[in-house]
Image (cartoon, helix red, strand yellow):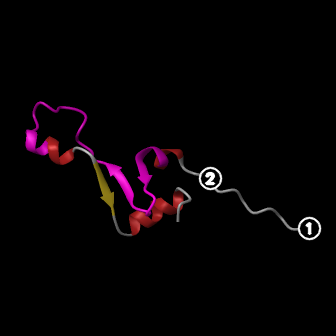
Amino acid sequence: MKQPSKKLRIRKSVSNRFSVTKNGTVLRESSFHRHLRRTKSKRQLRRLKGKHQVTGTLAKKIRQILGKA
């Protein structure tokens, strides 16, 4: 009798921090944007706003952990 294959466990911590688009692009939120915003310049806050793309081997690993590889 054949053993059933092991079920893929998705890391919840990674799924909360990263998102994968339809095309497979990995997106992340930038750090340093939540606290002590008064001391940062408006230019810096604009730069930190929104989602940013993750590239390279790190993106590949994140896709693998999320089961989207």
In magenta, the rendered stretch is: 15-44
Any magenta on residue 19?
yes
Q: Earlier in the sequence, mark 1 or mark 2?
A: 1
Residue 34 pos. (x, y %): 25, 35
For image coordinates 43% across by 63% down, the residue present is: 23
Classify residue 55 as left or right of residue 67: left
Q: Nearer the viewer, residue 23 or 47?
A: 23
With respect to residue 28, does 36 lie above or below?
Answer: above
Q: Nearer the viewer, residue 9 or 52?
A: 52
Question: In the rendered image, which quarter contains the N terminus?
Answer: bottom right
For image coordinates 41% across by 50% down, the residue present is: 18
Label 1: which secondary element: loop
Residue 62 pos. (x, y %): 46, 59
Characterize the local packing of mark 2: few (<14), some (14-19) or many (20 or more) Cα atoms within 10 angstroms: few
Whole-angstrom CA distance, mark 1 to mark 2, is: 24 Å
For image coordinates 53% across by 58% down, the residue present is: 65
Q: Which residue is mark 2?
A: 9
For image coordinates 75% across by 63% down, the residue present is: 5
Classify residue 34 as left or right of residue 2: left
Q: What is the residue that sits farthest to the right in this orientation?
A: 1
With respect to residue 7, does 16 lie above or below?
Answer: above
